[in-house]
Image: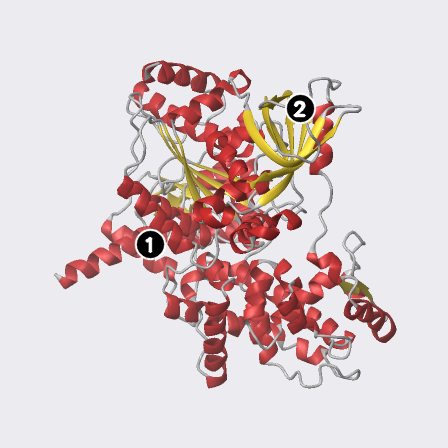
Amino acid sequence: MSHSYYIRNLRRRLIERFEPLIDMRDQSWPSDRDKEQALLSRSVAALAVKRETGCADRDAAESIIDGRRDWGIDAIAVEPATAHGVRHHITLVQAKWSDKANAGFGQSEVDRLFRGLDYLLDLDFNQFNKRIEPHVEALENALDSGSPKITLLLALVTDTDLHPDTRTLIDSEVKKRNWAEEMVEWRVLDLRGLFQEILGEHAERKIDLEAWMEGVGREEHPFSAYYGTISAAEVAGWYGTHDRHLFARNIRDSLDTDVNEKIRGTLLQEPENFWYFSNGITLLCDRIRKKGKGAFAPGAGAGFVLEGASVVNGAQTVSAMFRAMQRNAASTQRGRVLIRIISLENCPEGFGDKVTLSTNTQNPIEERDWKSRDPIQTGLRDDFALSLGRTYVVKRGESEPAADSGCTMTEAAIALAATHRRPELAAKAKRDDSQLWEKPNYQEIFGRDINSAPTAHRVWRCVRLVRAVKEALEKLSDNLFGRAASTASNGDLLISHVVFRNLETADLDAEDTEWESRLAQVPELVERTLGWLVATIEATYGRNSQILTTMRTAERVRVVARRVLAEMASGAPTPDNADYRVEERVQGKPARSTNAVSLLVKAERIPVGSVLEFRPVTRPDRQGLSAWLAENPERARATWRNSAAKPLVWSADGQSYAPSTLVRKIRTEAMGNNQQVQGTLYWHIPGEGSLVDLAAELRAEDELNAGD
């Protein structure tokens, strides 16, 4: 069929499904055709989100942030981490509709998309339009807790491949952000994939597979099933041919977890042992047919044709095999895996669903579980009880003690890693605390045996220190945004390391050590450390460097920690990082808001009568103001008048205000917080930026003209 057939039906179904759900009121459109084209593009983005996450149409429609200042990101979806090692998953969609099935994606789109990604990684949400606000909390949680998986999904209505130069450019940009760990991936969802998704259950998704197994066994009662060993190369070939449709009956597609990475590592480094280390694959099919002549012989090799096949357990194993084959086919081909194939031909209705559910809900045994049986941990549990009268929980599933009553083994491991003499352990703990249970890291923080293990006093004091650091950072974060907020959020363990090094800790194991007085020094030390940390990262790696990645990279953490400690020991004044704080005045200098407003008024940069939007800046702002603003949308709007003293006419009461005065009034009424802040950060011209951004542009133009 010609692409016109697919375009015609795709257009119709997109409009039917998403026109009632997608908000198009964010701007006026030059014509009805322009509005329809925008709706179709947004609908493509929503469909891509639905395909990636499995969410409902309404949720997919609410993921849309397309509009002015979207930085190439048309939709955002965040899936939270699970208890079984699945990372937070952030999906960022760039969508393009084309009536002729030739939607393009070139260098300018690539540059804009990755600039938007960097803004998100720096928690600089105010660079985006207002439609991002509903997603900010989920984004912050994902970017704060471990390294998320980030998928850049290019949903393009096209029947041609991306230009090789564009692919090379995207790969290069992804590599820059994955230099420390695999965090960002990208994929194209083209016309064919979009059409398959819009068909939904009407699409033909039955898959027939051919399989050759060694050492085959058979179960005949009560239902027919075969089991044996199959080559990794053959399984990888299934995935290469059928992709996600191979998992049609599974609870969800293959997941990107640390387990997936370990599977690939085994296949690449010791493929001969893969059969022993893997849990194997379970596959359901509508019918099993023997391939080839001769009767079935138990224990021999046999070929099968599997009709209506689907992998219901082992999706990670399958996808990891495929990626390992791409990386090193020679090694991966030596891998073998155990497989079970169950025929549903004579099974009762619903039996396949029961198999799927049962094989996916068994709790895996983690390395941490083995360590809970280590004499070091049981000794600490007893030492906590006898020496401190507190609880030390060693097993997963046990109730966590109240904060004052004790801690878990995991919290202890993280605290000991953060306060260790080697800051690299803080980076490992921040990146993935499961690494702490690996033998070399475990022995560094807990000792090689019971005789070298830390005392309960040391562990408990380190835990309390890290808690105190996090509490101090939470208070400081009330006034931070952008890179400083990202540093406070992601740098808690590195900051704990620096603070610990600045305290007297030689007597940490002594029973009578006065620890309270040292904990009292923590807030001041945290503020100094944070000031130096932001300045040091930017001086060392640049203002565009990724804070999140830096905090999770052992090499960078080692360099930064050494330099921060040296600066603090030098007695030099602590940098105030004023560019990332919302306070109105810094060290007695003139108000920055006043300067910005005067500049904008003098240049007549903003047309009189322009409508401005109020945008919360800090995390506490977003938490404390969102519901209050939603009660009356007029509270989030103001009209511009060219007055240096009071340029904003608040839509909620019709009165004129200076930006900072109005923000202070809003924060007081909504949160009871009357702190004076830089109000020009909060008021935005839709599609152009904050008053601070506009004033910065004018200053840059002045400097350029002065240079000429």
Up the image or down, 53 lies above or below 265; here it is above
Q: Residues within 10 Å of mark 2 (few under 14, many from 20)?
A: few
Measured Cα–Cα span from mark 1 to mark 2: 88 Å
Compare marks 1 and 2 and give the one earlier in the sequence.
Answer: 2
Where does the image place residue 35, in percent across and percent down from the top left? Answer: 34, 23
Q: Secondary structure at mark 2?
A: loop
Q: Quadrant of the N terminus?
A: top left
Above or below residue 230? Residue 520 is below
Q: Which residue is mark 2?
A: 295
Residue 501 can be seen, yes or no? yes
Of the pair 498 and 703, the residue shown nearer to us: 498
Query: x and y percent of residue 434 in the render?
Result: 64, 58
Which mark is in front, 1 or 2?
A: 2
Name the side, left or right, on which 486 lies relative to 596.
Answer: right
Q: Who's the residue at 63% across and 77% down the image?
A: 521
Name the outermost residue toward the left.
708
> Which percent across, then down, holds residue 515?
72, 79
Query: How far from the left and from the top, in percent, is residue 243?
Result: 49, 32
Looking at the rendered structure, the kind of residue marked 1 is Val
Quarter occupied by residue 469: bottom right
- The local secondary structure at tag 1 comes to helix
Q: Give the labeled residue for mark 1.
A: 597
Of residue 534 and residue 627, the one placed in the foreground of this image is 534
61 left or right, relative to 73: right
Residue 49 appears left or right of 79: left
In this rendered view, identify the residue nearer to me: 451 or 270.
Answer: 270
**Label 1 neighbour load within 10 Å: few <14, some 14-19, many 20+:** many
Tell me the quarter of the image containing the C terminus.
Answer: bottom left
The answer to which quarter of the image holds residue 596 is bottom left
Q: Does 660 appear above or below 152?
A: below
Q: Total number of numbered labels?
A: 2
Residue 641 appears anywhere in the view? no
